[in-house]
């Protein structure tokens, strides 16, 4: 099988509040970002996190990307840069080298292919990734909650952990990709349909911190309360 996923990044002001995202479908995506980063850093990180999220899956990976810079880095330029000690033909250091080195490691043993898609051209997967990356950058801009997504899963079974914190520079003090853990919460449901007497029914669902964060992320993406997401699932 082939996993078909879009990867995209967003930076308001470039550099500025930034977000990255990869997207397979509404139940399989992830996002993150920083208070200050460049668009290229966000684009590269989206690809890196996609490879990390699928590292335990023995499938081909088709990466849909609207960044020629990212595609050229991975498919054309990295081998030459590595031979030159991660320096360009003019001898200058390669930009974003720490991210590129991580991507280079993540590619080992993987079967993958990149495909360029035009951005903002109504490509469903690209638009979905772009929207989620931009939502993160806007959340950092206004100081709001960061939508992280459910992560990678297939048929409801998780294939790995949520995106790990990853420094852009290798400096422990540098901004990192990742999200603070949310507290365990509960959500109450009211007025469920199906009672023959139309009586009100209250149902309380206990969730782990990870489950609650996934619920909130899906609710934020749809622009509805968490209770509505659970109602729709039921």
Image (cartoon, helix red, strand yellow):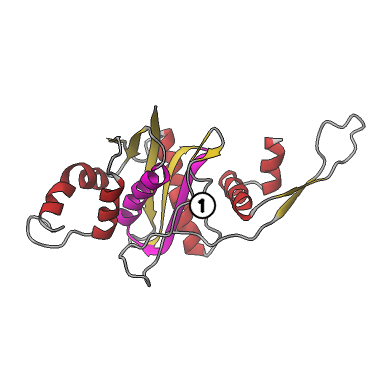
Does residue 36 show up magenta in the picture?
yes
Seen from the viewer's position, the closer of residues 17 and 59 is 59
Seen from the viewer's position, the closer of residues 190 and 160 is 160
Seen from the viewer's position, the closer of residues 73 and 209 is 209
Spot the residue most to the right: 197
For the record, the magenta segment spans 26-55
Please give left or right for residue 30 compared with residue 195 in the image: left
Res 96 seen here? no
Quadrant where the C terminus is found in the figure? top right
Element under disc 1: loop
Does residue 102 show up magenta in the picture?
no
> Could you tell me which residue is drawn at 49 percent across and 49 percent down?
161
Seen from the viewer's position, the closer of residues 197 and 131 is 197
Residue identified by numbered label 1: 148
**Position of residue 173 measured from the top left corner of the image (x, y, whole percent):** 38, 72
**Position of residue 233 measured from the top left corner of the image (x, y, whole percent):** 67, 36
Please give left or right for residue 84 compared with residue 40 in the image: left
Indicate whether 110 appears above or below 14. above
**Position of residue 80 measured from the top left corner of the image (x, y, whole percent):** 12, 49
Spot the residue most to the top: 1
Please give left or right for residue 28 compared with residue 49 in the image: right
Please give left or right for residue 200 compared with residue 123 in the image: right
Within the image, what quadrant is residue 199 found in? top right
Res 161 seen here? yes
> Could you tell me which residue is drawn at 34 percent across and 37 percent down?
64
**Position of residue 215 measured from the top left corner of the image (x, y, whole percent):** 62, 47
Mark 1 nearby-residue class (10 Å; few <14, some 14–19, many ≥20): many
């Amino acid at each position: 099988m082939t996993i078909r996923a879009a990867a995209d990044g967003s930076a308001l002001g470039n550099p500025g509040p930034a977000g990255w995202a990869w997207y397979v479908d509404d139940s399989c995506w992830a996002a993150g970002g920083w208070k200050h980063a460049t668009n290229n850093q966000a684009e590269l990180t989206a690809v890196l996190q996609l490879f990390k999220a699928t590292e335990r899956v023995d499938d081909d990976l088709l990466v849909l990307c609207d960044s020629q810079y990212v595609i050229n880095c991975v498919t054309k330029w990295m081998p030459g840069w590595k031979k030159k000690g991660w320096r360009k033909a003019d001898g200058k250091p390669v930009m974003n080298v720490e991210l590129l080195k991580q991507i280079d490691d993540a590619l080992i043993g993987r079967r993958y292919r990149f495909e360029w898609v035009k951005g903002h051209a109504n490509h469903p997967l690209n638009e979905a990734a772009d929207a989620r990356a931009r939502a993160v950058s806007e959340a950092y801009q206004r100081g709001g909650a960061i939508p992280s997504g459910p992560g990678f899963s297939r048929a409801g079974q998780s294939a790995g952990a949520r995106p790990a914190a990853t420094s852009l520079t290798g400096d422990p003090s540098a901004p990192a990709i990742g999200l603070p853990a949310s507290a365990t919460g509960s959500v109450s449901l009211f007025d469920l349909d199906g009672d023959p007497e139309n009586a009100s029914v209250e149902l309380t669902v206990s969730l782990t911190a990870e489950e609650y964060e996934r619920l909130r992320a899906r609710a934020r993406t749809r622009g509805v309360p968490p209770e509505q997401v659970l109602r729709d699932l039921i």
